[in-house]
Image (cartoon, grey):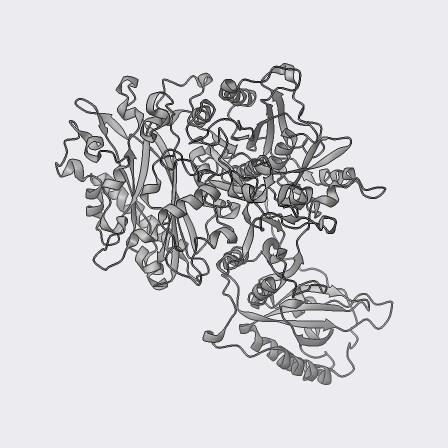
């Protein structure tokens, strides 16, 4: 994680010198204790017998179906009841606090008050706590000790009964476990040690869909899982002790859209939530929404909205869009996310970031903005926001698109977004600076929408809309978790299954793969369509997100859908990511967002093998690329973007690089960076043939060239290109370095005269020419085809300024892939000598991670130790050098 910003560091004040101390003991009131039971021996003996019947035999390891959760002991559930009060003057009979043995993790998970004021509880009994529990109960059953009552009386005397229990006890009593319908379930997970993270990893390993958002309360995290009741029960039963309670997830947003008809109204919901909002810090990061304006006086937005203006003051800052508005919805989602979640609970909402609204579209009565000016208007909006509050960490959201523009090649609008991200605004005034020093920006743009129509046509997906083809912008597509319609919609069905690509979301799978990056890169919630008996489909409020509406007086809440909603949700993600990890580069935030993404189950089933297979599921690289051009790298997971875990750790590098230099007659390649990775080799070796994943994400921003061949050739559109190369399994460190330096080192090509471009011919990427057998998938000495371990391989890296690939295979095979290099690829800095940029410097973010989901192994600890050793060794080598 990023450290604290040095500019904000303050030295703490010490109160040591004004402190005095003494011994304190709380006063104990004198209470004459009366026996609670007439016959403690009979009571204790009965409880011992019940406990023995309630505890099943501990299964042998090879027959144990319980799922290992890091930080959780294996154990079972038992049901415990208290004795009802004997008079109305007595209070409720609660499970006594001493009954729990916190040190042994014997705890009450959930309890229920009965009408007779007794209490029923589900208790987790770890396997290693059984003996101590029986020992204590045996001592209690011996009865009174010389008038002092039995031993451990506070722990057991109120307990009336102990019975066996199972996972059904954690569900509502009305749950129909034979219902085949998929729905969302709230798993209330104990927030101890690393149990929530471990449970999420285990759920994913069991091929359950886990919602990327979690609600965090003191001692509890609410994890949302999409499953049938039977699937949820099976998972809950196999993770005893991790989950306190299971509740059905909220249904649709329609109750909040109802005007109430004399009952609760939208305004009641809005007032309740507004009273629970805690404003962000004054220096919090901000998300700037460029759209149709905003209802700035909306009670749900006033605490977080710090700027509302327009590129033309005459337009006004209000949301002029028809019906419920548009910009207001995007701003609302960027600030709060889907309002369905905070509306459905009573927690306080502490805002971690603020929002800004810049109107870029003119209202009715003003001349429409000509398409050729879209890029300039967008850049003007950026400058307006930054001028109003300079030096503020911010990201930008753009939901608008030009549906009639061909997105198969760069446009002026997409090129303008690339300039914005790379720090090339006309008003930046930094053209004399090297590229690495220019002010980079995080820009998120909606992929564009399919509005509806025949289901068969909608599901095929149309092409992304301009400017979503931007290389540097993070293009946001949509997926949906919304798959429940009310009874009044009996003739309608959801078009997409839950957790699949949203029908609204456009794709790039029909566009040229060698000219256009994988778009969209990531997915966020965009809502679903409803389809009728004729096969016609369109949006439906029950399948939409809930946002603030522009009509504050009449309809302050509104449904919102499509990739406009998704880009608002992306802004919500980015604002929280920047708040949690301040000080990173925009290139790094983009990399972390993509790197943290995971595919929901309907998508993952097309790629991931079942039952722990080591290789990717069927189909060639081309088919996988086609799929990724529809769904990107999945749904970003904020917890994975923010922090590492013991068995899932991330490494980050941020660096400047000079990719080219002056040669005798032309520019030549200049610099390669090598990273000696802190691989946890012992832990990986112990995992043996268990499947692990390594993700590598390389992110940098290019300056676009739209002239001449720039729009049709990646190597002339980008200012510079970068690629990563992994050390081969049987390759020494020296050989790895030599492989990426061999052209000049071996004298095969005189770089000053001919350089790599002519040597490689038509190949755009030097990595392709320098691949060894291991990387290319040819038989290595051991007969292994390691190229099959990569999801995409280097051929997928022709276009774009973000490259992500995933290696999947045996842990023992990953051990010696312990170094990576970042090296240049062709760009116009090198080929366009008249620009005199051949010696310029760029920068990049490199993110790598190893994941061994479900494995009881501490990869992070060993990697941390190895990292220190490597840092010392490299520092010593530098001094000697």
Residue 122: name its quadrant.
bottom right
Q: Residue at x 70, y 49 (%)?
A: 491
Question: In the figure, is residue 58 to the left or right of 484?
Answer: left
Q: Residue at x 84, y 73 (%)?
A: 86
Residue reaching furthest to the front: 534
Residue 710 at what x, y percent from top left? 35, 25
Residue reaching furthest to the right: 88
The answer to whether residue 579 shows anywhere in this view is: yes
Q: Locate the C terminus by quadrant.
A: top left
Residue 248 at what x, y percent from top left? 67, 56
Question: In the figure, is residue 555 to the left or right of 425?
Answer: right
From this view, report whether residue 154 is shown above or below residue 662.
below
Residue 776 at what x, y percent from top left? 26, 48
From this view, report whether residue 645 is shown above or below residue 824.
below
From this view, report whether residue 76 is shown above or below residue 175.
below
Residue 829 vs residue 585, the one in the foreground: 829
Question: In the figure, is residue 742 to the left or right of 30?
Answer: left
Residue 369 at what x, y percent from top left? 56, 18
Residue 709 vs residue 452, the one in the foreground: 452
The answer to whether residue 696 shows anywhere in this view is: no
Q: Residue at x 83, y 67 (%)?
A: 90
């Amino acid at each position: 994680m990023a450290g604290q910003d040095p500019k904000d560091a303050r030295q703490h004040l010490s109160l040591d010198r004004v402190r005095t101390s003494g011994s304190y003991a709380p006063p104990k009131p004198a209470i004459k204790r009366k026996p609670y039971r007439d016959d403690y021996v009979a009571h204790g003996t009965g409880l011992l017998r019940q406990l023995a019947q309630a505890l099943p035999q501990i299964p042998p390891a090879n027959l144990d179906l319980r799922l290992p959760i890091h930080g959780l002991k294996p154990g079972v559930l038992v049901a415990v009841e208290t004795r009802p009060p004997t008079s109305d003057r007595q209070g409720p009979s609660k499970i006594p606090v001493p009954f729990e043995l916190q040190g042994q993790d014997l705890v009450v998970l959930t309890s229920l008050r009965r009408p007779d004021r007794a209490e029923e509880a589900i208790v987790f009994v770890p396997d290693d706590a059984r003996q101590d529990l029986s020992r204590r109960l045996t001592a209690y059953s011996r009865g009174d000790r010389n008038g002092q009552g039995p031993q451990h009386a506070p722990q057991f005397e109120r307990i009336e009964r102990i019975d066996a229990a199972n996972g059904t006890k954690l569900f509502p009593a009305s749950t129909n476990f034979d219902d085949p319908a998929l729905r969302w379930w709230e798993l209330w997970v104990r927030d101890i040690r690393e149990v929530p993270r471990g449970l999420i990893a285990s759920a994913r390993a069991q091929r359950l869909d886990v919602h990327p958002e979690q609600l965090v309360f003191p001692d509890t995290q609410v994890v949302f899982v999409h499953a049938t009741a039977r699937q949820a029960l099976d998972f809950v039963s196999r993770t005893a002790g991790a989950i306190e309670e299971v509740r059905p997830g909220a249904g649709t947003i329609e109750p909040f859209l109802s005007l109430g008809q004399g009952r609760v109204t939208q305004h009641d919901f809005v007032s309740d939530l507004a009273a629970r909002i805690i404003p962000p810090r004054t220096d919090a990061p901000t998300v700037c929404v460029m759209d149709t304006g905003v209802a700035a006086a909306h009670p749900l937005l006033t605490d977080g909205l710090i700027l509302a203006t327009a590129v033309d003051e005459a337009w006004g800052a209000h949301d002029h869009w028809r019906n419920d508005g548009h910009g207001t919805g995007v701003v609302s989602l960027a600030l709060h996310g889907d309002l369905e979640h905070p509306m459905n609970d009573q927690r306080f909402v502490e805002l971690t970031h603020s929002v800004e609204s810049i109107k870029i579209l003119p209202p009715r009565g003003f001349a429409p903005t000509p398409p050729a000016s879209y890029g300039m208007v967008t850049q003007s909006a950026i400058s307006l926001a930054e001028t109003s509050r300079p030096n503020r960490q911010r990201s930008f959201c753009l939901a608008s698109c030009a549906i009639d523009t061909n997105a198969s090649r760069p446009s002026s609008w997409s090129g303008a977004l690339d300039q914005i991200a790379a720090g090339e605004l006309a008003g930046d005034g930094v053209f004399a600076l090297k590229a690495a020093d220019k002010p980079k920006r995080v820009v998120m743009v909606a992929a564009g929408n399919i509005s509806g129509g025949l289901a068969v046509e909608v599901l095929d997906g149309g092409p992304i809309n301009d400017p979503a083809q931007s290389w540097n912008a993070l293009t946001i597509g949509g997926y949906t978790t919304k798959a429940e319609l009310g009874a009044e919609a009996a003739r309608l069905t959801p078009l997409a299954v839950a957790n699949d690509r949203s029908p609204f979301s456009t794709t790039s799978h029909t566009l040229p793969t060698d000219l256009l990056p994988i778009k969209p890169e990531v997915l966020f919630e965009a809502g679903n369509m409803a389809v009728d008996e004729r096969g016609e489909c369109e949006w439906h409020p029950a399948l939409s997100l809930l946002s603030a509406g522009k009509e504050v007086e009449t309809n302050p809440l509104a449904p919102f859908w499509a990739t406009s909603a998704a880009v608002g949700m992306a802004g919500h993600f980015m604002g929280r990511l920047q708040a949690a990890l301040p000080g990173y580069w925009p290139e790094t935030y983009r990399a972390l967002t993509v790197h943290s993404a995971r595919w929901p189950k309907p998508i993952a089933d097309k790629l991931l093998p079942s039952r722990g297979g080591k290789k990717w599921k069927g189909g060639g690289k081309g088919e996988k690329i086609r799929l990724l051009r529809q769904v990107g790298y999945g749904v970003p997971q904020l917890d994975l973007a923010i922090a590492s875990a013991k068995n899932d750790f991330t490494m980050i590098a941020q660096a400047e690089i000079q990719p080219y230099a002056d040669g005798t007659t032309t520019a030549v390649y200049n610099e390669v960076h090598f990273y000696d990775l802190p691989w946890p080799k012992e832990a990986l070796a112990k995992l043996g043939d268990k499947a692990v994943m390594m993700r590598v994400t390389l992110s940098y921003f290019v300056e676009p060239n739209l002239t001449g061949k720039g729009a049709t050739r990646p190597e002339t559109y980008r200012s510079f290109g970068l690629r990563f190369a992994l050390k081969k399994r049987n390759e020494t460190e020296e050989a790895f370095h030599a492989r990426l330096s061999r052209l000049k080192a071996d004298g095969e090509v005189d770089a000053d005269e001919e350089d790599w471009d002519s040597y490689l011919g038509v190949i755009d990427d030097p990595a392709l020419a320098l691949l060894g057998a291991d990387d290319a998938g040819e038989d290595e000495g051991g007969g292994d085809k390691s190229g099959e371990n990569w999801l995409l391989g280097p051929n997928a890296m022709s276009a774009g300024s973000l490259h992500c690939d995933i290696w999947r295979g045996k842990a023992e095979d990953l051990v010696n892939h312990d170094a990576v290099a970042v090296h240049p690829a062709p760009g116009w800095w090198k080929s366009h000598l008249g620009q005199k940029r051949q010696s310029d410097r760029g920068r990049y973010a490199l993110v790598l991670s190893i994941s061994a989901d479900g494995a009881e192994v501490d990869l992070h600890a060993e990697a941390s130790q190895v990292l220190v050793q490597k840092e010392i060794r490299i520092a010593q080598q530098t001094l000697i050098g």
